[in-house]
Amino acid sequence: MSTGAPTRASASLRGCVCCLFLLFSFLALLILAIILVIVLAVKPKKPQFDLQQVSVQYMGVSPTTPSSAAVSLTIHMLFTAVNDNKVGIKYRESKFTVMYRGIPLGRGIVPGFYQPAHSVRQVETTIAVDRVNLLQSDAANLIRDASLNDRVELRVEGDIGAKIRILGFTSPGVQASVDCAIVISPRKQAVTSKQCGFDGLSV
Protein backbone atom coordinates (compact mmCIF):
# COMPACT_ATOMS: atom_id res chain seq x y z
CA MET A 1 0.00 0.00 0.00
CA SER A 2 1.44 3.39 -1.05
CA THR A 3 1.85 6.23 1.46
CA GLY A 4 3.29 8.73 -1.01
CA ALA A 5 0.11 10.79 -1.47
CA PRO A 6 -0.53 11.49 2.23
CA THR A 7 3.12 12.38 2.71
CA ARG A 8 3.03 14.84 -0.19
CA ALA A 9 -0.20 16.37 1.17
CA SER A 10 1.32 16.78 4.63
CA ALA A 11 4.43 18.39 3.19
CA SER A 12 2.29 20.73 1.08
CA LEU A 13 0.25 21.74 4.15
CA ARG A 14 3.39 22.48 6.13
CA GLY A 15 4.67 24.52 3.23
CA CYS A 16 1.48 26.60 3.11
CA VAL A 17 1.59 27.23 6.87
CA CYS A 18 5.22 28.30 6.59
CA CYS A 19 4.40 30.64 3.70
CA LEU A 20 1.52 32.21 5.64
CA PHE A 21 3.72 32.69 8.70
CA LEU A 22 6.40 34.40 6.61
CA LEU A 23 3.76 36.58 4.92
CA PHE A 24 2.25 37.73 8.22
CA SER A 25 5.71 38.35 9.68
CA PHE A 26 6.62 40.46 6.65
CA LEU A 27 3.40 42.47 6.91
CA ALA A 28 3.92 43.05 10.64
CA LEU A 29 7.48 44.26 10.04
CA LEU A 30 6.29 46.47 7.20
CA ILE A 31 3.61 48.09 9.37
CA LEU A 32 6.14 48.61 12.19
CA ALA A 33 8.60 50.19 9.75
CA ILE A 34 5.90 52.54 8.43
CA ILE A 35 4.96 53.59 11.97
CA LEU A 36 8.61 54.22 12.86
CA VAL A 37 9.08 56.35 9.74
CA ILE A 38 5.98 58.37 10.59
CA VAL A 39 7.09 58.83 14.20
CA LEU A 40 10.52 60.01 13.07
CA ALA A 41 8.92 62.39 10.59
CA VAL A 42 6.45 63.77 13.15
CA LYS A 43 9.09 64.06 15.92
CA PRO A 44 6.64 63.95 18.85
CA LYS A 45 7.30 66.28 21.76
CA LYS A 46 6.48 65.78 25.41
CA PRO A 47 3.02 67.23 26.14
CA GLN A 48 2.52 69.63 29.04
CA PHE A 49 0.00 68.92 31.78
CA ASP A 50 0.13 71.54 34.53
CA LEU A 51 -1.97 72.39 37.55
CA GLN A 52 -2.94 75.92 36.59
CA GLN A 53 -5.20 76.92 39.47
CA VAL A 54 -6.33 75.64 42.88
CA SER A 55 -9.20 77.21 44.77
CA VAL A 56 -10.61 76.38 48.19
CA GLN A 57 -14.38 76.23 48.31
CA TYR A 58 -14.48 75.10 51.94
CA MET A 59 -12.16 73.90 54.69
CA GLY A 60 -13.06 73.08 58.27
CA VAL A 61 -11.26 71.35 61.14
CA SER A 62 -13.09 70.35 64.31
CA PRO A 63 -12.03 68.26 67.33
CA THR A 64 -14.23 65.19 67.79
CA THR A 65 -12.60 63.77 70.94
CA PRO A 66 -9.59 64.82 73.02
CA SER A 67 -7.42 62.61 70.79
CA SER A 68 -9.02 63.00 67.36
CA ALA A 69 -10.18 65.62 64.87
CA ALA A 70 -12.26 65.67 61.71
CA VAL A 71 -11.36 67.56 58.56
CA SER A 72 -13.76 68.60 55.81
CA LEU A 73 -12.41 70.06 52.61
CA THR A 74 -13.54 70.96 49.11
CA ILE A 75 -10.96 72.14 46.61
CA HIS A 76 -11.32 72.80 42.89
CA MET A 77 -8.36 72.16 40.56
CA LEU A 78 -7.94 73.45 37.02
CA PHE A 79 -5.37 71.73 34.80
CA THR A 80 -4.05 73.00 31.46
CA ALA A 81 -2.99 70.46 28.83
CA VAL A 82 -0.80 71.76 26.00
CA ASN A 83 -0.14 69.67 22.91
CA ASP A 84 2.48 71.15 20.58
CA ASN A 85 2.69 67.99 18.49
CA LYS A 86 1.58 67.45 14.90
CA VAL A 87 -0.55 64.54 16.09
CA GLY A 88 -3.31 64.09 18.67
CA ILE A 89 -2.90 62.75 22.20
CA LYS A 90 -5.40 60.52 23.96
CA TYR A 91 -5.44 60.85 27.77
CA ARG A 92 -7.01 58.16 29.88
CA GLU A 93 -8.92 58.81 33.11
CA SER A 94 -6.65 60.29 35.78
CA LYS A 95 -7.08 60.12 39.55
CA PHE A 96 -5.65 62.61 42.04
CA THR A 97 -5.37 62.11 45.80
CA VAL A 98 -5.12 64.87 48.40
CA MET A 99 -3.07 63.97 51.49
CA TYR A 100 -2.16 65.48 54.83
CA ARG A 101 1.22 64.34 56.20
CA GLY A 102 1.02 61.22 54.03
CA ILE A 103 -2.57 60.35 55.05
CA PRO A 104 -5.04 60.14 52.12
CA LEU A 105 -8.06 62.39 52.67
CA GLY A 106 -9.96 62.27 49.38
CA ARG A 107 -9.74 61.72 45.64
CA GLY A 108 -10.67 63.59 42.48
CA ILE A 109 -11.06 62.25 38.93
CA VAL A 110 -10.34 63.86 35.57
CA PRO A 111 -12.20 61.97 32.80
CA GLY A 112 -10.23 60.74 29.83
CA PHE A 113 -10.19 62.98 26.76
CA TYR A 114 -8.67 63.35 23.30
CA GLN A 115 -6.59 66.43 22.53
CA PRO A 116 -6.04 67.42 18.88
CA ALA A 117 -2.68 68.54 17.55
CA HIS A 118 -1.49 72.08 18.30
CA SER A 119 -4.15 72.78 20.91
CA VAL A 120 -4.59 73.89 24.50
CA ARG A 121 -7.31 72.41 26.67
CA GLN A 122 -8.39 72.98 30.25
CA VAL A 123 -9.77 70.17 32.39
CA GLU A 124 -10.97 70.36 35.97
CA THR A 125 -11.84 68.26 38.97
CA THR A 126 -13.17 68.79 42.49
CA ILE A 127 -11.90 66.90 45.52
CA ALA A 128 -14.39 66.68 48.39
CA VAL A 129 -13.39 65.49 51.86
CA ASP A 130 -16.29 64.92 54.25
CA ARG A 131 -15.33 64.74 57.94
CA VAL A 132 -12.35 62.42 57.67
CA ASN A 133 -11.11 61.52 61.16
CA LEU A 134 -7.47 61.86 62.14
CA LEU A 135 -6.17 60.33 65.36
CA GLN A 136 -3.70 61.35 68.06
CA SER A 137 -0.57 63.09 66.78
CA ASP A 138 -1.98 63.74 63.30
CA ALA A 139 -5.09 65.33 64.80
CA ALA A 140 -2.96 67.47 67.12
CA ASN A 141 -0.79 68.59 64.21
CA LEU A 142 -3.80 69.47 62.09
CA ILE A 143 -5.47 71.47 64.87
CA ARG A 144 -2.22 73.33 65.54
CA ASP A 145 -1.65 74.04 61.85
CA ALA A 146 -5.21 75.24 61.31
CA SER A 147 -5.91 77.22 64.49
CA LEU A 148 -2.49 78.52 65.56
CA ASN A 149 -0.45 78.71 62.38
CA ASP A 150 -3.31 79.27 59.92
CA ARG A 151 -1.27 77.16 57.53
CA VAL A 152 -2.29 73.65 56.45
CA GLU A 153 0.01 72.03 53.93
CA LEU A 154 -1.53 69.39 51.70
CA ARG A 155 -0.13 67.27 48.92
CA VAL A 156 -1.92 66.40 45.69
CA GLU A 157 -0.57 63.40 43.80
CA GLY A 158 -1.78 61.61 40.69
CA ASP A 159 -0.78 59.62 37.62
CA ILE A 160 -1.53 60.61 34.05
CA GLY A 161 -1.62 58.13 31.18
CA ALA A 162 -1.42 59.18 27.54
CA LYS A 163 -1.16 57.68 24.06
CA ILE A 164 -0.28 59.29 20.73
CA ARG A 165 -2.58 58.69 17.74
CA ILE A 166 -0.97 58.67 14.29
CA LEU A 167 -3.05 57.87 11.20
CA GLY A 168 -5.45 55.75 13.22
CA PHE A 169 -2.66 53.94 15.09
CA THR A 170 -2.31 54.34 18.85
CA SER A 171 1.11 54.19 20.49
CA PRO A 172 1.81 52.15 23.64
CA GLY A 173 0.70 53.92 26.80
CA VAL A 174 3.10 56.17 28.70
CA GLN A 175 2.63 57.48 32.20
CA ALA A 176 3.59 60.57 34.17
CA SER A 177 3.22 61.65 37.76
CA VAL A 178 1.96 64.96 39.13
CA ASP A 179 3.05 66.00 42.60
CA CYS A 180 1.83 69.32 44.03
CA ALA A 181 2.35 70.87 47.44
CA ILE A 182 -0.34 73.42 48.34
CA VAL A 183 -0.71 75.53 51.47
CA ILE A 184 -4.20 76.54 52.60
CA SER A 185 -5.21 79.29 55.02
CA PRO A 186 -8.33 78.05 56.88
CA ARG A 187 -9.15 81.60 58.03
CA LYS A 188 -9.01 83.06 54.53
CA GLN A 189 -10.41 79.88 52.94
CA ALA A 190 -7.77 80.32 50.26
CA VAL A 191 -4.63 78.77 48.81
CA THR A 192 -1.60 80.83 49.82
CA SER A 193 1.06 78.91 47.88
CA LYS A 194 1.37 76.18 45.25
CA GLN A 195 4.36 74.26 43.93
CA CYS A 196 4.02 71.46 41.39
CA GLY A 197 6.23 68.93 39.70
CA PHE A 198 5.46 66.97 36.53
CA ASP A 199 7.68 64.02 35.81
CA GLY A 200 8.00 60.81 33.89
CA LEU A 201 6.11 61.31 30.62
CA SER A 202 8.05 60.47 27.47
CA VAL A 203 6.71 59.79 24.00
Image (cartoon, rainbow, N blue to C red):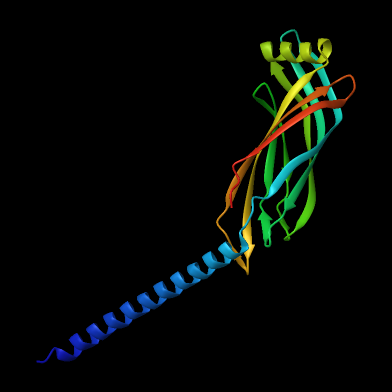
Residue shown at the point (69%, 15%) measured from the top left:
138
What residue is drawn where x is 68% and y is 49%? Answer: 93
Q: Of 87 and 160, which appears nearest the observer? A: 87
* Image: 15 above or below 132: below
> Image point 71% across, 33% down: which residue?
196
Where residue 12 sits, quadrant-wise, is bottom left
Residue closer to the observer: 73 or 36: 36
Residue 98, position as x, y percentages in the image: 71, 31
Q: Is residue 24 left or right of residue 59?
A: left
Extreme top residue here?
A: 66
Q: Determine whether, in the image, residue 153 is placed left or right of residue 31.
A: right
Left or right: where 72 falls relative to 47: right
Out of 150 and 103, give the one closest to the viewer.
150
Tell me the residue at 74%/49% (across/down). 81
Relative to 44, 131 lies left or right? right
The vertical placement of 17 against 52, above or below, is below
**Residue 164 rendering spot, x and y as whole percentages:** 62, 58
Q: Is residue 119 above or below residue 154?
A: below
Quadrant the N terminus occupies: bottom left
Corner quadrant of residue 177 = top right
